[in-house]
Image (cartoon, rainbow, N blue to C red):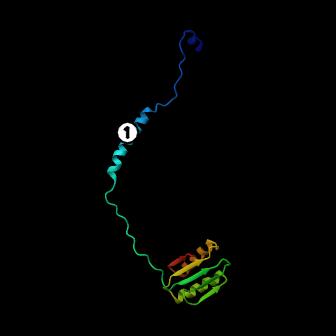
Amino acid sequence: MSNISSMRGGRSRKFKSEINVVPYIDVMLVLLVIFMVVAPLSTPSMINLPKAGKSNQPPTEYLEIELKPDGSATVGVHGKKTVSTKKREELGNRLEELHAKYPDLPLMISADKDIKYDEVVQTISQANKTGIARVGLSTR
């Protein structure tokens, strides 16, 4: 068939598989103009920002646990006598004793930077099991 059309001097038709993007560009330019006109109209005239209150001071008296990288810890009331422990079970028992003696005091945990974070989480979990509601982390 192509031979016959070429003998007659006609051209063979090829389909164009191109997308005409001119209408899409026109639509995008119209949308751009609309957004440029509407954007300045929608700026709020009044912004309600939250108020910052005074920062709370840490309590003057609190239970304190200091975790050390070798697995030992010191437990006690801040500014008073502290006791060193070697095992986690001892830490839990001592924490229960202190919470029974001082039920209203919060707990502050300070850990060495070389300690695994899991040990800090386990200590927080032990404190929650003993009934201590307020637990804080100390940074150094």
Q: For the view shown, which residue lies furthest in the top direction?
A: 8
Q: Is residue 131 above or below residue 101?
A: above
Q: Which residue is mark 1?
A: 30
Residue at (36% x, 45% y) in the render: 36
Query: Are there few (<14), some (14-19), or many (20+) residues within 10 Å of tag 1?
Result: few
Quarter location, residue 6: top right
* Pick the front one: 91 or 59: 59
Drawn side of residue 47 relative to residue 136, left or right: left
Residue at (34% x, 47% y) in the render: 38
* Pick the front one: 41 or 103: 41
Q: For the view shown, which residue lies furthest in the right direction?
A: 70
Residue 65 spot, x, y in % from top left: 58, 82
Quarter location, residue 88: bottom right
Residue at (41% x, 39% y) in the render: 28
The C terminus is located in which quarter?
A: bottom right
Residue 26 spot, x, y in % from top left: 40, 35
Drawn side of residue 110 relative to residue 59, left or right: right
Q: Is residue 32 above or below residue 75?
A: above
* Pick the front one: 87 or 76: 76
Residue at (66% x, 77% y) in the render: 69
Looking at the image, can residue 43 be seen? yes
Residue 4 spot, x, y in % from top left: 57, 11
The N terminus is located in which quarter?
A: top right
Tell me which amino acid carries mark 1: Val
The number of numbered discs placed on residues in the rendered structure image is: 1
Residue 109 spot, x, y in % from top left: 56, 79
* Pick the front one: 76 or 91: 76
Looking at the image, can residue 1 be seen? no
- The local secondary structure at tag 1 comes to helix
Q: Is residue 59 above or below residue 117?
A: below
